[in-house]
Image: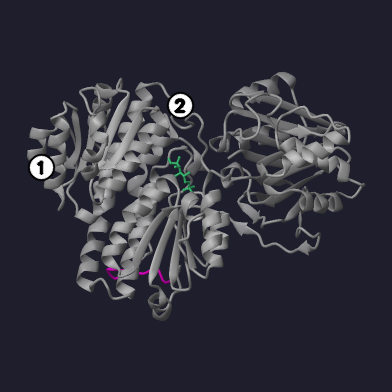
C-alpha cells in the first residue's frame, strides 16, 4: 500500500526513482510524485494517474539531480488529487517527505499546528508529519527525528530530505515496511525488493522504530531513542528477470503459467528419500511437536482461501484441533492461543497489517508462531519463531495466482511433515500422497495447455453480470478463490458458496442470466454436488463445470465443461484452481479491464 523509493549516488535520481516506482506500482497507482535535490533546491513534481503520467511530466521539466525520493499512492486520507499526492513539503520548503502508512493522531496534531499558524495545502495525514518535523528541527536531524517518533501514533515508513543537508536522505520505519539498499557509492530505500533489484541485492532491513541516514558512503541506523544500532547486510536471492513480463501481455498471465515451476521449486530440497523433510527450515523436535494441541491458521484474502484448503488436509492428516480465521477477525476475537497452540500465519507479502497484528497477539499469548510467506526478511518473517518460504519468486500482478499455488504446496508439505512427526499419518499413506504431489507440476502444466477452451468459455459468458461459484469439501475454498479472482480483475459480481448451502438462500438469485460455475472433480462428494447442479438447472441457470478427465456424466448435466487431469481427492485444488484463474483473466481481458492493476486494490495491504 503506497510505494516508496529513495536514492542518493552518481546516477540521475529521477531515472532511478521512476524505474523504482514502476516496479512498485502494484502497491498503489492512483497518483505518483517525486522530489529531487539539485543545487541546494528541493524540486517536487506530482501527478494524478500512473507512474507513466509522472514520467512524462519529469521529462518535460527535464528534472535532474543525484538525490531524491519518490512515491506511488493508494489513497487513504484525502481523495486522489495533485495536492494530496506525495511528496509533501513543509510551508517553508525546507523538508520534503514521502509516507506509507496511517498517522492515527493526525487530527490532534493538525489542530495544534494550525493553532500555531501553520497553513496546510492537502487533506492528508502525511502533511502533518512534515510540518511537525520542520518545527522540531533545531539543526540536528537525528534529534528532530527522535522527537518526531515520540509524537507520531500509527504506522509509517518515511523517506525524508532536508534542504540544508546534501548527499543524505533519512528513513523511519514503524509498522510499514522499508528496506535499505547498498550500492557502490550509492544508497537506496524502497518499500519492496523489486525496486532495488536492477541496482543492488545487498540490503538492510529496518526494524520497528529504527531511524536511518542513507548517503553515498553507506548507511547509519539508530533505534527510536537515538542509540546507534549495528545492522547486518542480507543478500536477496531474486533475479531482475523474475520481475519482468517476458513475452506475456500481463504479469498475471505469466504468473499463472509459472505455476508448474512454482510447485517444482517448492518441492525441491524438501523431499528426501520419498519423505518430506522440513528439518533444515523447521528445527522442531518430537517433544515440541507433540506439545501442540491446537492449530490456528490466520490470513487474509487469497492467503485465507489457501489456509482453508490446508485446513481440510491438516484435520485429516493430524490430530490437531484446526481453526482457520481471517486475520482482521482473529485479532478481535477471544480465540485464545496458548503454549499448546501452533499458530500459522499465511501471507504472500509478509506485510499485511491485520495478519501482523494477529501474529503479535498469538505470540503474546504464548503460541509458537510460524510464517508461511513468499518474502524472506518481511516483517512477518522476522516476527515469528519459524518461517516456511514459498519460493514462488516475486509476484507483480495484484491478483495472487502463483503464490496461492505456492501456499497450498508449502502447507501440504507442512501437513505431511506434521502428520508423520505426530504419527497420525501412516508412512504408507504419507508416501502415496507425496508421490501424487510430485506428479502435480506436470498435471498443472497439462491443465495450462488447455487455456484455449477457457478463453472460449470466457467469450461465451463475457457479458454476464453475476456468477455463482459452488464447490464442496476440498472444492469449496477453490470456489471462493475463483469468485474472488473474477471480482478482483473483471469487476463481475461473483458469490461463492459451499454447494450444499445454495438452497439455504443463494438459490433465490438463480435464473437464466446467472451462470453457475461448479467445481466438481471426481471425489467422494461428486454425487452430492451433482444433485446441487440439478437444483440450479431447475432454475434455468447455465451450468459451467470444472470436472475431471473421463467424467462423461458431467457432460450430460453441464452446459460447458472445463477439464483437469485426474488426481487424488486431496490434491484436486492444485488443478481445479487453474481454469478459474484463467477464466477470470480472459473475462477481464475481454472486458478491457486493467488486469495487473485492478481498480481500488493494492498488492500489500499495510493498513488495518
Ligand atoms: O500478502 P498477503 O498474502 O497477506 O495478502 C493477502 C490479501 O491481501 C491478498 O491475497 C489479496 O486478497 C489479493 N488481492 C488476492 O488476489
Could you say where residue 565 lies in the image, as x and y percent from the top left? 18, 45
Q: Which residue is mark 2?
A: 594
Residue 67, visible in the rendered structure:
no
Give the quarter of the image for residue 486: top left
Mark 2 Cα-neighbour bin, 10 Å: few <14, some 14–19, many ≥20: few
Q: Is residue 529 left or right of residue 320?
A: left
**Numbered-mark total:** 2
Horizontally, residue 63 falls left or right of residue 365, namely right
Which one is earlier in the sequence, the residue at label 2 or at label 1?
Answer: 1
Image quarter where the N terminus lies is: top right
Q: Is residue 526 visible?
A: yes
Residue drawn at x 56%, y 38% is 27
Vertical comparison of 173 with 504: above or below: below
Q: Secondary structure at mark 2?
A: loop
Q: Which residue is mark 1?
A: 551
Q: Nearer the viewer, residue 409 or 494?
A: 494
Quadrant for residue 532, please give it: top left
Specify the farthest residue to the bottom. Answer: 287
Mark 1: give few (<14), some (14-19) or many (20+) Cα within 10 Å. few
Q: Position of residue 342 (x, y in %)?
A: 43, 67
The residue depicted at 49 percent of the width and 31 percent of the height is 597
Element on which disc 1 rests: loop
Q: Which residues are magenta?
A: 271-279
Amino acid at each position: 500500500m503506497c510505494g516508496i523509493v529513495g536514492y542518493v549516488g552518481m546516477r540521475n535520481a529521477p531515472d532511478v526513482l521512476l524505474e523504482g516506482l514502476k516496479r512498485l506500482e502494484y502497491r498503489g497507482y492512483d497518483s505518483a510524485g517525486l522530489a529531487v535535490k539539485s543545487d541546494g533546491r528541493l524540486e517536487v513534481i506530482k501527478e494524478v494517474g500512473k507512474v507513466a503520467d509522472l514520467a512524462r511530466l519529469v521529462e518535460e521539466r527535464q528534472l535532474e539531480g543525484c538525490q531524491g525520493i519518490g512515491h506511488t499512492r493508494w489513497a487513504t486520507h484525502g481523495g486522489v488529487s495533485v495536492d494530496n499526492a506525495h511528496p509533501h513539503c513543509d510551508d517553508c520548503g525546507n523538508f520534503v517527505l514521502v509516507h506509507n502508512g496511517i498517522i492515527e493522531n493526525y487530527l490532534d496534531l493538525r489542530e495544534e499546528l494550525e493553532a500555531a499558524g501553520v497553513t496546510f495545502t492537502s487533506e492528508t495525514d502525511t502533511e502533518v508529519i512534515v510540518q511537525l518535523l520542520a518545527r522540531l528541527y533545531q539543526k540536528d536531524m537525528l534529534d528532530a527525528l527522535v522527537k518526531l517518533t515520540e509524537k507520531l501514533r500509527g504506522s509509517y515508513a518515511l523517506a525524508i530530505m532536508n534542504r540544508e543537508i546534501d548527499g543524505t536522505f533519512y528513513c523511519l520505519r514503524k509498522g510499514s515496511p522499508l528496506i535499505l539498499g547498498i550500492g557502490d557509492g550509492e544508497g537506496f530505500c524502497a518499500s519492496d525488493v523489486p525496486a532495488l533489484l536492477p541496482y543492488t541485492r545487498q540490503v538492510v532491513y529496518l526494524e520497528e522504530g529504527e531511524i536511518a541516514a542513507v548517503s553515498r558512503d553507506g548507511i547509519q541506523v539508530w533505534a527510536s531513542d537515538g542509540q546507534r544500532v549495528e545492522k547486518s547486510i542480507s543478500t536477496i536471492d531474486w533475479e531482475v528477470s523474475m520481475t519482468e513480463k517476458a513475452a506475456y501481455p500481463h504479469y498475471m498471465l505469466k504468473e499463472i503459467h509459472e505455476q508448474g515451476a512454482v510447485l517444482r521449486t517448492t518441492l525441491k530440497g524438501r523431499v528426501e528419500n520419498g519423505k518430506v523433510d522440513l528439518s533444515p527450515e523447521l528445527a522442531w523436535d518430537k517433544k515440541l511437536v507433540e506439545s501442540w494441541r491446537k492449530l490456528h491458521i490466520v490470513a487474509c484474502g487469497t492467503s485465507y482461501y489457501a489456509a482453508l484448503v490446508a485446513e481440510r488436509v491438516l484435520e485429516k492428516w493430524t490430530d490437531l484441533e484446526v481453526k482457520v480465521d481471517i486475520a482482521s477477525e482473529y485479532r478481535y476475537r477471544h480465540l485464545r492461543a496458548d503454549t499448546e497452540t501452533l499458530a500459522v500465519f499465511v501471507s504472500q507479502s509478509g506485510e499485511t497489517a491485520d495478519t501482523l497484528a494477529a501474529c503479535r497477539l498469538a505470540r503474546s499469548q504464548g503460541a509458537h508462531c510460524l510464517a508461511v510467506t513468499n518474502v524472506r526478511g518481511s516483517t512477518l518473517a522476522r516476527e515469528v519463531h519459524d518461517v516456511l518460504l514459498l519460493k514462488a519468486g516475486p509476484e507483480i500482478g495484484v491478483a495472487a495466482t502463483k503464490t496461492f499455488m505456492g501456499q497450498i504446496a508449502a502447507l501440504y508439505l507442512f501437513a505431511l511433515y506434521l502428520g508423520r512427526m505426530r504419527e497420525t499419518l501412516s508412512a504408507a499413506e504419507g508416501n502415496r500422497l507425496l508421490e501424487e504431489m510430485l506428479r502435480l507440476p506436470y498435471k498443472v502444466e497439462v491443465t495450462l495447455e488447455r487455456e484455449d477452451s477457457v478463453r472460449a468459455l470466457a467469450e461465451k459468458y463475457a457479458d454476464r453480470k453475476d456468477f455463482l461459484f459452488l464447490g464442496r469439501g476440498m472444492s469449496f475454498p477453490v470456489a471462493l478463490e475463483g469468485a474472488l479472482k473474477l471480482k478482483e480483475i473483471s469487476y463481475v459480481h461473483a458469490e461463492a458458496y459451499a454447494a450444499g448451502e445454495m438452497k439455504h438462500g443463494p438459490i433465490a438469485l438463480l435464473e437464466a442470466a446467472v451462470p453457475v460455475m461448479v467445481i466438481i472433480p471426481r471425489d467422494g462428494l461428486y454425487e452430492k454436488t451433482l444433485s446441487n447442479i440439478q437444483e440450479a438447472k431447475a432454475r434455468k441457470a447455465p451450468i459451467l463445470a470444472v470436472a475431471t478427465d473421463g467424467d462423461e456424466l458431467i457432460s450430460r448435466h453441464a452446459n460447458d465443461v472445463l477439464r483437469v487431469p485426474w488426481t487424488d481427492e486431496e490434491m484436486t485444488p492444485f488443478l481445479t484452481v487453474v481454469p478459474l484463474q484463467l477464466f477470470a483473466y480472459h473475462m477481464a481481458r475481454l472486458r478491457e479491464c486493467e488486469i495487473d492493476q485492478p481498480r481500488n486494490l493494492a498488492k500489500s495491504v499495510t493498513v488495518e
